[in-house]
Amino acid sequence: MATAPQGIFDLLSPYPPGWGGVLLTGAASTVAISAGAFLIGLVLGTGGALGKLSGSRPLRLLLQFYTIAIRAVPELILIVGLYYAGMDGLNRLLALFNLPGFELNGFAVAIAVLGFVQGAYMTEVLRGAILAIPVGQIEAAKAFGMGPGLRFRRIVLPALLPNALPGLANLWMSIMKDSALIAVVGYQELALATRLAGASTKHYFIFFMASALIYLALTLISNALFNLIEKRVRRGQPKPAGGFAP
Amino acid sequence: MTFSWIDAYWPLLLTGAWQTIALLVISVVFGFLIAIGLAFAQVSGGPVTRALSRGYCTFFRGTPLLIQLWLLYYGVGSLLPMIPGIRQSLFWPILREGFFFAAVSFTLNYAAYEAEVLRGALLAVPKGELEAGRAFGMSRWKLTRRIWLPRAIRIALPTIGGEIVMQLKSTPLAFTVTVMDLYAVATKVRQDTLLVYEPLIVVTVFYLVITAIIAGTFRLLERQVPMRR
């Protein structure tokens, strides 16, 4: 123990006696989990929003239940519950087809679970964004004889993006922070990597401060990126009239 | 689905519920008080207080609550005993508990989110009302106390309700630092009885009931002071 590295830079160095590499690997898997869940949420949310706006009555009720239930239950309970339920369900499904059950990859389950939760929030954001599109634009597209697919791709999607982006940016930030909850079910992303580093060196404060700063850097970088994207999708939109400043 | 375990565990469930509610009330009340200070620091403070308050809000809103909680519990908690004499002090039995760290980190976190909401609301109070107050010869302090803050709180009321529900939904994190809250009780039932879903369902229903109570209370509150839109 006496020869163990003790300085902050020794502890955080990216090469094996230091724990910096472990933290960075954890951060990479945090970003990967968040990105995967964000994409799954985007797909579920688009489907959910379109279903809520134009689906049949039973489908609308089902989606209503999905969004309300997911948004009302604490994330930790959802993640733990779905994590076990997802593993259990898949193994039972495999057993049904006489396939051998297997220990699921924690990474895939984490993405699936967070994406399913994210989908409920995305549904609401995208629904609001679609509703904010002037009806005339969609009617004009119909009048030109565009089918639903073409209409969505050419008219609805570009028009909803500026409305939806602030909400999507918020969701991205919240999913990066929610992905820390995966640590509770034992998958090693940034939060759990930090706890391991702290537990084996007893320098908890340094490591948690370091990982807080990594999360903060990720958040700030994403914030800047989303601002750039928003400026890009808002090009060609009229600037808000003067005298609107708070 | 078997729910017969409830007979044996209901006293534990009640203490768990009590801990959850205590965490929620403590963090919301103290967090709100801190948030008032932070919001005013950003709206009417000097450049230094403004930067400090902004930095605080960015840090606590930009990092996961779980990391903040572990930073306090493991990080600060492991540094605390180095302060000479703290083990003999009156407060040690409190400072030793996970509950203390959970309450502090939830309070600090809630304050950051709430400050941002209040800041927007303070800026949204119509200028004319503040000018009217000033025309009546109200001092800065009286104007803030009688008009600016109450109007801002009224404007922020719907958002505050939402923030409290969000806060309720983060309280289960306390179980990671040995607090015996409602979620921890569900985990204990799972370990004892090997039932996975039933305890989670019971606990979920409890959270839903509290959410409904909070939402109902805020609907009543909002009706007390009708607002012209």
Image: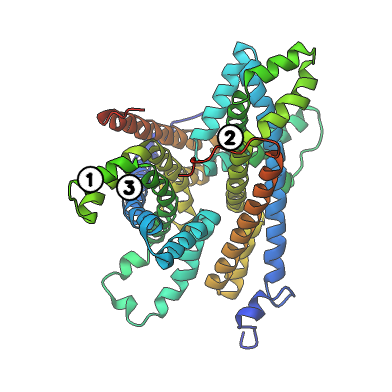
Q: Is residue B78 left or right of residue A207?
A: left
- The structure residue drawn at horizontal position 33% and vertical position 29%, both measured from the top left corner, is B219
**Disc 2 to disc 1, C-alpha distance:** 42 Å
Residue A238, placed above or below residue A106 = above
Whether B32 is drawn above or below A46: the answer is below
Instruction: Identify the element where label 1 is drawn.
Output: helix
> Where A172 sits versus A89, above or below?
below
Q: Where is residue A190 drawn, in percent x and y? A: 64, 59
Residue highlighted by disc 2 = A121
Residue identifier under label 3: B25
Query: Same subunit under labels 2 and 3?
Result: no
Q: Are marks 1 and 3 on the same chain?
A: yes
Chain label for disc 3: B
Badge 2 element: helix
Residue A208, image quadrant? bottom right
Q: Is residue B198 visible?
A: no
Q: Residue furthest bottom?
A: A2
User: Comparing marks 2 and 3, which lies closer to the viewer?
Assistant: 2
The type of residue carrying mark 1 is: Gly
Q: Amino acid at mark 3?
A: Val
Coordinates of residue A227 in the picture (x, y in percent)? 64, 48
Q: Are marks 2 and 1 on the same chain?
A: no
Disc 2, disc 3: CB below 8 Å? no
The chain to which mark 1 is attached is: B
Query: Between B95 and B66, which is closer to the camera in this rendering?
Result: B66
Residue at mark 2: chain = A
Q: In percent of the image, x 33 and y 53: which residue is there? A: B36
Image coordinates for residue B113, horizontal then vertical, percent: 45, 50
Mark linked to residue B133: 1
